[in-house]
Amino acid sequence: MLRREQDLRWLPWALLGALGWLFVYADRAVLSPLLREFGRLFHVGPTALGLLSTAFFLTYTAVQIPAGRLADRISPRTLLGIGYLGFGLFIALTAFSPGYDGVLACSALAGLFQGVYYPTQFAVTARRIPAGVLPLANAVITSGMGAGIALGYIVASGLGQASWQTPVWVLGVLTMGIGVVLYLITPKDVRRGDGTAAPAAPVEPAAPDARRSGRSRFALLLALNFCSLYAFFFLLAWLPYALAGMVPWHGLQLGAAAAWPTIVALPATILWSARGPQGAARLRRMRLLLLLAGAALALVGFARSPLVLLALLTLYGVTGKLTLDPLILSEVTASLGEEGYGQAFGLLNFVGMLASVVAPTLSGLLIQHYGGFSAAALVAAVIVLAGLALTAWLRPAAA
């Protein structure tokens, strides 16, 4: 009989979470390869194009804390089902918007409904998955993010040749289908043991010093998450746009090149988390990832050879946000008590996603007025390396 930490009862929930993230990120990414055509069609420039992502992430960010509180109080099935269905609906409606303002409004409403997914899904995961395999489970779940970006880019490049609307409504309809699946499969109450759930064990109240230490670590993790996400959403919004002017590729070739960092992140995410590093080992791994990701971003805007550019994008892919996420999530779980997981993950994503509000528009301004893609990439690199500096104050915690 395998020990609880060694069996695979956690895997179905992790795969369902990955499926959810697959379509969340596919829908986020689908417009990026179409931005040049979209800008010409609606006569808007890079700043207005960046505002599309900013509007989505502004509402997404605003709902994180209230959604996290709800995730600790009501059925996760209800939250995930309603949120995901509404998200898919407004993604599909984006394709039928008559102009730029309609697309902007649908983007904002889609972000509002999608916002419930992160705090609810990871709160369920933290309660349901044994601590010994939590980093690996989080890696499986977050692998759906990278796969989703690749799916969005490739679907947009393949189906968007004739019209930008086709890939958008196709993914929107599929997303609504996943919302139904989430509603049917998600447990009504993960606090009840049902053979796969991990019911909470009684814990003694933490000492005041321990509580203060946990809050301090959590504050540092909030700032670190912001730094990591800024670079990620800069690339998500602007890499396809930049590549169109940097490499002699078009259509599916261009979509595959833009998706390449997320494709190579898939195995890297699992490998970095496979042994479930804990304490000081996990912290050392986080520092290495931040250093390499920052270096890749600092150089990527100055690459002139397609091969050098792909090499730098590969380096970012295997060290960037997608590979760092499972380690940060495990650090948060180790820092806080189960009773507040939903609120904690909501706050984590709220602060992190402030970067998604800032990065697309700020990067658009830098690209349009202050030195192009290389300047925007350099700013992203500085912010990632600032996250590395923050880890000097981050002390190890047991998983």
Image (spheres, rainbow, N blue to C red):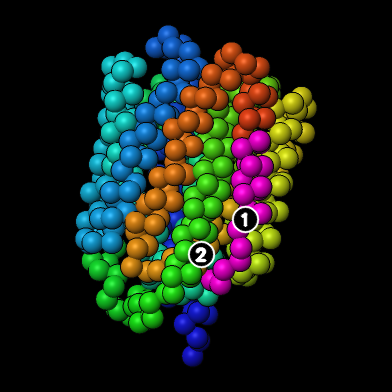
The residue that appears at 67% across and 30% down in the rendered structure is 378
Q: Secondary structure at mark 1?
A: helix
Q: Image check: 119 left or right of 153?
A: left
Q: Residues within 10 Å of mark 2 (few under 14, many from 20)?
A: some
Q: What stretch of residues is rendered in magenta? A: 381-399
Q: Where in the figure is residue 255, as x and y percent of width and height? A: 56, 32
Which residue was labeled with disc 1?
393
Q: Where in the figure is residue 383, as x and y percent of width and height? A: 61, 37
The residue that appears at 44% across and 12% down in the rendered structure is 44
Which residue was labeled with disc 2?
213
Query: Furthest-top residue in view?
Result: 43
Query: Furthest-front residue in view?
Result: 208
Total numbered circles: 2
Q: Image check: 199 left or right of 2?
A: left
Q: Residues within 10 Å of mark 1 (few under 14, many from 20)?
A: few
**First in sequence: mark 1 vs mark 2:** 2
Tell me the distance, in whole angstroms, between the alpha carbons under discs 1 and 2: 11 Å
